């Protein structure tokens, strides 16, 4: 009986560790739904397009716009995240558009960044650059009028880090990228899978013992 209790405790611990390690919710307001409190009233006068001069999404800084798809910007259909989306619009004579957030990594290690992106159906194509701590980790040319899920892995030290989305300044005209559903989570390590396997084996032995 004592041995069985020990196996149960060890198995549950091995199964719990991977869950504790894979922490989600590192990015705040990744759907751009919450507007900064002091600026929220400025957005109600133009619910379709929220210009950065009027309001910004909480936890995000930069030169960007927000839309809910009912105003001047036509959001590609079937937005998988729904609600507001981030707009990165650049012109031939305007600086690049960007949005950045400081996030906290609980431990040093590999992390996965996931998001959705799309290009506007008209105008020129815009390249979207994604950076972690000012280092580019990925560049994307989204499909016009269609949402594409993207993901990239990166290493981060424990503590404060930054993620940034930036549209390349277009030399030929007006370009726009949409971003939504931004999320960062800890990437499972090989050792985590080993612990998970040990836990499952332990539970299997318990089940076999009970049947006998």
Image (cartoon, grey):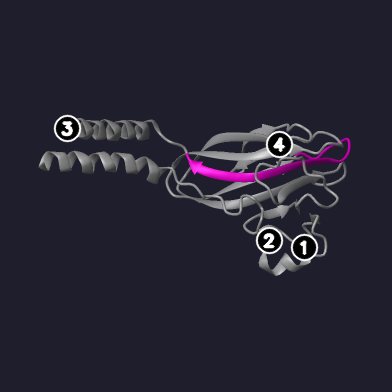
Q: Residue 43 carries which label?
A: 1
On screen, 51 above or below 113? below
Q: Give the SS element for disc 1.
A: helix
Q: Is residue 186 left or right of residue 143?
A: left
Q: Give coordinates of residue 84: x percent, y percent.
A: 71, 52
Q: Give the SS element for disc 4.
A: loop
Q: Give coordinates of residue 87: x percent, y percent.
A: 75, 47
Q: Quadrant of the N terminus?
A: top left
Residue labelled with disc 2: 35
Q: Which residues, given as a range, are shown in magenta?
A: 168-186
Q: Give coordinates of residue 91: x percent, y percent.
A: 85, 43
Q: Distance between the residues labelled 2 and 4?
A: 23 Å
Residue labelled with disc 3: 209
Q: Which of marks 3 and 2 is nearer the N terminus?
A: 2
Nearest the viewer among 51 and 69 is 69
Query: Can the viewer see residue 27?
Result: yes
Callout 3 crowding tier (Cα within 10 Å): few <14, some 14–19, many ≥20 = few
Residue drawn 77% across and 57% down? 52
Q: Which mark is residue 147?
A: 4
């Amino acid at each position: 009986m004592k041995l069985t209790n020990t196996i149960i405790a060890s198995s549950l611990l091995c199964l719990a560790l991977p869950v504790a390690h894979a922490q989600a919710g590192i990015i705040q307001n990744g759907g751009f739904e919450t507007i900064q409190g002091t600026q929220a009233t400025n957005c109600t006068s133009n619910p379709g397009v929220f210009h950065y001069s009027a309001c910004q999404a909480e936890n995000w800084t930069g030169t960007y716009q927000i839309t809910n798809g009912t105003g001047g910007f036509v959001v590609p259909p079937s937005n998988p995240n729904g609600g507001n989306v981030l707009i990165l619009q650049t012109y031939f004579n305007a600086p690049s558009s960007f949005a950045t957030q400081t996030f906290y990594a609980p431990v040093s290690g590999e992390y996965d960044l996931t998001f959705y992106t799309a290009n506007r159906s008209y105008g020129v194509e815009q390249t979207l650059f994604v950076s972690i701590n000012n280092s580019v980790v990925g560049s994307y040319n989204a499909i016009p009028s269609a949402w594409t899920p993207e993901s990239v892995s990166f290493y981060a030290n424990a503590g404060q880090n930054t993620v940034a989305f930036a549209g390349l300044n277009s030399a030929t005209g007006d370009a726009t990228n949409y971003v939504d559903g931004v999320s960062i989570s800890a990437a499972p390590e090989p050792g985590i899978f080993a612990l998970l396997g040990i836990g499952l084996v332990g539970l299997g032995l318990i089940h076999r013992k009970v049947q006998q």
